[in-house]
Amino acid sequence: MEKRKNLAVICLTSVFLLGFLIWSFLKPDSAVSQSERRKLAQKPDLTAAAVLNGDFMTKFESYTLDQFPLRDGFRRLKAAVLLDVLRKKDNNGIYLADGYAAKLEYPLDEASVCHAAERFQLIYETYLAGTDTKIYEAMIPDKGAFLAPQNGYPSLDYSALSALLQENMPYAEPVDLTPVLSLDSYYRTDLHWRQEALLPVAERLAEAMDIKLSAQYDTVTAGAPFYGVYCGQSALPLDPDPLRYLTNETLRSCTVYDYETGSTGPVYDLDALEGEDPYSVFLSGSKSLLTITNPNVDTERELVIFRDSFASSLAPLLVSAYAKITLVDIRYVQPERLGRWLTFDAQDVLFLYSVPVLNHSETLK
């Protein structure tokens, strides 16, 4: 009887494994993971050179992991077991607290912050020193600043990060945004801040830069729910956020020039609301170099923002005070090349970077 049980278990296990093996070979490969917002590994080419140097097996392992049948279901099961059964406090570095999903940002990497400051110093010495530009810097804390310590998660020293950045940027006037931010300033399922909560941030910057902003906006709520990046990274069934954007006649009359494509479009890319990353509705997402032109303003004043993706939703709220706002993302364009397109003389210049970029500045060119 015992032998029959063992034989049955072996047979069922073999059928299960064989079934998944056949399924994995027969199912079409997926190009992207919608939940994780990334491209999936594809079947590597089998060549003698790739086999001999080990490259084939490394890529084939990544391929099998990415293309495994029911992969998203198994990811959700793993996350549920880790958090609900084994009582782990995070999954893939993502934790849940107070109804928010956030990524662990710890510890402070001083070398990374100094590297970011070195790249900013290069920009200053190459383009800004000796000009009439007015230079400002502002650090954007991640939501962990308002969530991690209160819930027993490790958190870096944001004051030390800010002080280190200021120490290495003596040419820039610091603007502290923390007092006008709170946990409610951020999406529950995404790392970014919510545009409809950023008017106090815009006013804080306006006060520092001595500009006057329009305070009249219409709030538009996107029809589709917004599943932020942490939905896929956590592999948990999180409820979506509403995605809202602020608009008015000034913003509707503005145009955005994309230096990469040479094309001109609106401030809000409404088609992106139906795409993989609805946050790309703000200035069409990740772009190396953009200029917003405001034709209905009685000033020639210009602003240049060296930025990451957080500025995409903030910049439109500063448009009413400027004839032009140029956004530069040195994650995608080398600072040494900026002289081909930009001339600095008397603009306002704002270095606006989030903690995740400053603490992982290897992304900066």
Image (tube, rainbow, N blue to C red):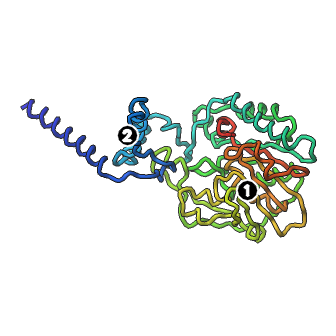
At which x and y percent is residue 135? 86, 44
Q: Is residue 253 above or below residue 139?
A: below
Closest to the observer, 149 or 277 = 277
Placement of 21 over or under 316, stated as above or below: above
Give the residue at x 89% y 40%. Answer: 129
Q: Quadrant of the C terminus?
A: top right
* Nearer-the-camera pick, 99 or 266: 266
- Circle 2 packing at 10 Å, graded few (<14), some (14-19), many (20+), is few
Left or right of 129 on screen, residue 325: left
Within-10-Å neighbours for mark 1: few <14, some 14–19, many 20+: many
Secondary structure beneath label 2: loop
Q: Along the horizontal axis of the image, is 161 left or right of 23?
A: right
Q: Residue at x 87, y 38 (%)?
A: 171
* Cα distance in 3D space between marks 1 and 2: 42 Å
Q: Locate the N terminus by quadrant.
A: top left
Q: Which residue is mark 2?
A: 46
Q: Amino acid at mark 1?
A: Leu
Closer to the observer: label 1 or label 2? 2
Residue bearing mark 1? 290
Residue 86 shown left or right of residue 230 in the figure: left
